[in-house]
Amino acid sequence: MASRWWRWRHGCSWKPEARSLGSGCPGRAGPSGPRAAAAAADVTRAQVSYFNLVKSLTSAFPIMYSISRFHHTTPAACCCSKTRSGERYTDPFKLGWRDLKGLYEDIRKELFISTTELKEMSEYYFDGKGKAFRPIIVVLMARACNIHHNNSRDVQASQRTIALIAEMIHTASLVHDDVIDHASSRRGKHTVNKIWGEKKAVLAGDLILSAASMALARTGNTTVISILTQVIEDLVRGEFLQLGSKENENERFAHYLEKTFKKTASLIANSCKAVSVLGCPDPVVHEIAYQYGRNVGIAFQLIDDVLDFTSCSDQMGKPTSADLKLGLATGPVLFACQQFPEMNAMIMRRFSLPGDVDRARQYVLQSDGVQQTTYLAQRYSHEAVREISKLRPSPEREALIQLSEIVLTRDK
Amino acid sequence: MSLRQLLLRLPGYFGASAPPRRLWWSPSLDTIFSVVSWRGQSSRSPAHWNQVVSEAEKIVGYPTSFMSLRCLLSDELSNIAMQVRKLVGTQHPLLTTARGLVHDSQNNLQLRGLVVLLISKAAGPSSVDASCQNYDMVSGIYSCQRSLAEITELIHTALLVHRGIVNLNELQSTDGPLKDMQFGNKIAILSGDFLLANACNGLALLQNTKVVELLASALMDLVQGVYHENSTSAKENRITDDIGISTWKEQTFLSHGALLAKSCQAAMELAKHDAEVQDMAFQYGKHMAMSHKINSDLQPFIKEKTSDSLTFNLNSAPVVLHQEFLGRDLWIKQIGEAQEKGRLDYAKLRETIKAGKGVTSAIDLCRYHGNKALEALESFPPSEARTALENIVFAVTRFS
């Protein structure tokens, strides 16, 4: 979908609207609904007004999890069913956490080994301070699928284990990524490699991965094992994709999206698929779950890439312009490059010359790169909503719809 | 580079000692020749170890390959190879590991894979469960068992590569530019992860959750074992940790025994053998790996001619045993005496250790494990494969 849009966009020549960015920190990427969007068939007026609403709200309130905003923001485009369950809306995170109590304690149990320091290192990120975004999606999806299948209101133990496994695989990859990127802080504290050194950090990552594999094996379901081992492969391939680069502009974007899928979306998509397999035998449901996860995952990463340009470092818990400093050309940069072809050279040399990072950042902020990326993220998010709406209505389904929107409006 | 130097650089690398073969094993012409010619050669020549291995390879049908063909043809591997080439000229350990892996010589053994294949063949099809009759079998080994052997090697290699990561804050000017080390670390992590991902995928394809659990737990053990190795790695002037022989055994089981033991057990599980057979396979793998490790630890102490600058690991079996006999204080005193101007004189320390009981008791320990391995084999029916497994034990437990 995105590649079609990219080519179309590339073909039209139009100038972006002048935008006033917020005060203080460079403004949030509140989408203004570019003129071009009016031509797109599936943008309804409801969506445009939603965007404006979000834009005004998000610039006023940095905290994103308040529930009041979302009562009336289910986009008109996705309504397949008008009925809603009798329960009132709740915060999707609160809803999900009901099943995730003890998540971090349980993960720590999986990491129960006798070697004290290694255990400490492996448990370091399971302190309850992460967003736990992935486990939340997983348990909500589990319930949504169970309800869809036979109105069952229970989450199976194996489904909950998938939530643990997803978080563990994610964390293991973070630990390794931090060593690869020589990162010194994450989630507001020092990285494992900064404190204990690279050698031990790599081993800690391996340990978490092996513990996740053991938990996976104990589910006793070979289909689920196959689905989740695919994630492990995708994560590594995603990193390799990041090592290489493409010369052709069009190829670059496809390369970027593929890398985004492998590094971020694959885990969410396949975890969703895994819980749907455990909860429901219908392959149509498995595909819905997978597509939801995939689209939300890509949207999530695109916004993450935007935030790297637009947010301040104390909000994120990790320094910004991090991607540029690593030589990575993400969505905003690729879009900006269309308006400022002089960026091509910088992209090819991976921003390695002094001054490249700052110049590139300036170009991006002057261009519509941020807006375009955000708009693209919205498209993916709406696709996710469209998919999940095919399931039977339930509080969890609504929560997943909300989450898909929260992904767009987060600020850290 | 001499064989021993190559061996000392790769931790956990299977060493080579060359014992005679048991004479009653039905010898073919070339084996008789090698037995006869043995008398004229040093018993530590690598040629005989190779003989044992190449005979074993014939029994299992083909030389154990390094990685599956799919893996070899992948883009990532050529990507890795390209990146590793950039490390030529730097001092990153990955280069050494890579050379050791790719070096096409007798030293490059995938012994774990070979042992898994041999034990699969030695056990044969399950007499209890006939459901495996439909699996395809080549040279008496099921294709899933061959796949398992490959997976075992992948896991071993992945951790071998991950062992070569460098702590950036410990670098000295002699190690070269920081950028090179950072880049080397990056490629080492990615390569190791790539191998692990392939192993996981391979495991998933076996469609057997118990096997996945076994190998995942072996990986967990291996990671802990490597962690201990790192913590107790011998650095000049650093006093060793106070570990007794029982701790040493536990840690060595984690770093060397667990993977082979659990793989052997998993191979039995794939053929649907019962718990008893699985346990015997586990015991063989465990004890064989232990005696192998002790053998390689003993090499610096039993060779007649050694260069004076050759170092050895202060946490290897003979040294740990030596310390245990002497007591901690006396040992520390001996280390102090062997230090000249702050540098450890390994030759002197070696003589000190040889004069004590460490070396002989390490040899005894090696033979103890060898015998346990042979005991475990007794429950398998006699066959060429079983004999080959016995020969491997003999190869690692004979010291002239």
Image (cartoon, helix red, strand yellow):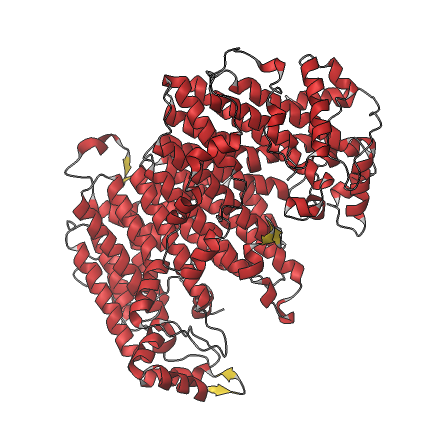
Q: How many discs appear?
A: 0
Q: Nearer the viewer, residue A186 or A27?
A: A27
A170 lies left or right of A115: right
Point out the image quarter for the C terminus of chain A. top right
Whether residue A309 is visible: yes
Q: Taking A317 as reference, is B322 above or below it?
A: below
Q: Position of residue B85 (x, y in %)?
A: 60, 53
At x 48%, y 36%, the residue is A135
Q: Nearer the viewer, residue B357 or B326?
A: B326
Q: Taking B321 as reference, is A18 above or below it?
A: above
In the picture, residue A159 is in which quadrant?
A: top left
Q: Nearer the viewer, residue B143 or A108?
A: A108
Q: Position of residue B347 (x, y in %)?
A: 44, 83
Q: Position of residue B160 (x, y in %)?
A: 45, 56
Q: Position of residue B200 (x, y in %)?
A: 42, 41
At x 71%, y 39%, the residue is A329
A52 lies left or right of A125: right
Whether residue A43 is visible: no
In the picture, residue A229 is in which quadrant?
A: top left
Point out the image quarter for the N terminus of chain A. top right
At x 21%, y 31%, the residue is B131
A194 lies left or right of A122: right
